[in-house]
Image (cartoon, rainbow, N blue to C red):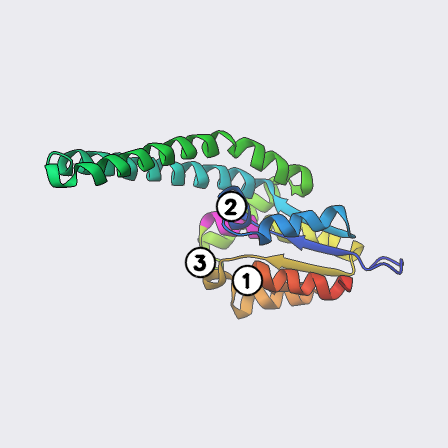
Amino acid sequence: MKGDSVLSILVVVETNFAVGYCMEQGRDFRYLLSLTSKYPLTVAIPEYSLREAKTTVLGKFRDSCEQLSHTRVLLREIGRSEYAQDLVDNARTVLSDLVQLLGVKQDSLRQALDLIANRCVVIPHSPVAHVRGLMRYIASESPFKESDCEIYECILEFLRDEVDNYDHTIILTFDKEHFDNVEIRGELADIGIDLVFTAGDCIAMVHYALGI
């Protein structure tokens, strides 16, 4: 721990945080990052997570556009009936606006990811973490999914070097199903790290530690 009187906090986030930020799925994502400019709070994210988030978000945009395309076909069919024409015209206008909005948001994805990278410490994906993650996955150890195993090992490698530089360290993951188990909690407890599964709980813990 630092010897300063000011408490220093490290929060490590992963792919779902970046996805939530890019998709604007709540204010907590932006709020947590905004605290880094005002308080001794550092947020770190694996490089792997940033790249995975880009693929995930682009996939969500692509799926949404495909669904909207199917809806256009359906509206065209319904609009052949006179009784539905006015409502269909209104729906098609809204649909066009929505498609345009999705295009704008997709174009801004790179800016959102760049902002996360600029506000966070980006954890490199090392060869050692890659191999350890692969071995964890092959052994069917939690968190079980191959990409999650690599991300987790990357985080562990980073924290072993950094945890003593902070007074309080938190890992925030939204994957409670795979990370909320005795094995992972034990590994993290051994190096003095808290594990939380909602942004709200993480922010509450940060507020308490910072006295705000």
- Looking at the rendered structure, the secondary structure element under dot 2 is loop
* Residue at (34% x, 39% y) in the render: 64
- Determine the image quadrant of residue 130: top right
* Residue at (54% x, 70% y) in the render: 182
Please state the horizontal and vertical placement of residue 54, each as a whole percent of the image. Answer: 49, 37
Q: Relative to residue 103, is residue 13 drawn left or right? A: right
Please state the horizontal and vertical placement of residue 99, each as a whole percent of the image. Answer: 36, 33
For marks 2 and 1, give the CA distance. 18 Å
Establish if 54 lies above or below 195: above
Judged from this view, the residue extending furthest toward the left is: 81
Q: Which residue is mark 2?
A: 24
Establish if 44 lies above or below 74: below
Residue type highlighted by circle 3? Ser
The earlier-in-sequence mark between 1 and 3 is 3
For marks 1 and 3, give the CA distance. 22 Å
- Looking at the rendered structure, the secondary structure element under dot 1 is loop
Q: Is residue 203 visible?
A: yes
Decide: few, some or many residues near mark 2? Use Cα within 10 Å; few <14, some 14-19, many ≥20.
some
Quadrant containing the N terminus is bottom right
Please state the horizontal and vertical placement of residue 201, each as a whole percent of the image. Answer: 60, 64
For marks 2 and 3, give the CA distance. 34 Å
Of circles 2 and 3, which is in front?
Answer: 2
Decide: few, some or many residues near mark 3? Use Cα within 10 Å; few <14, some 14-19, many ≥20.
few
Residue type highlighted by circle 2? Glu
- Looking at the rendered structure, the secondary structure element under dot 3 is loop
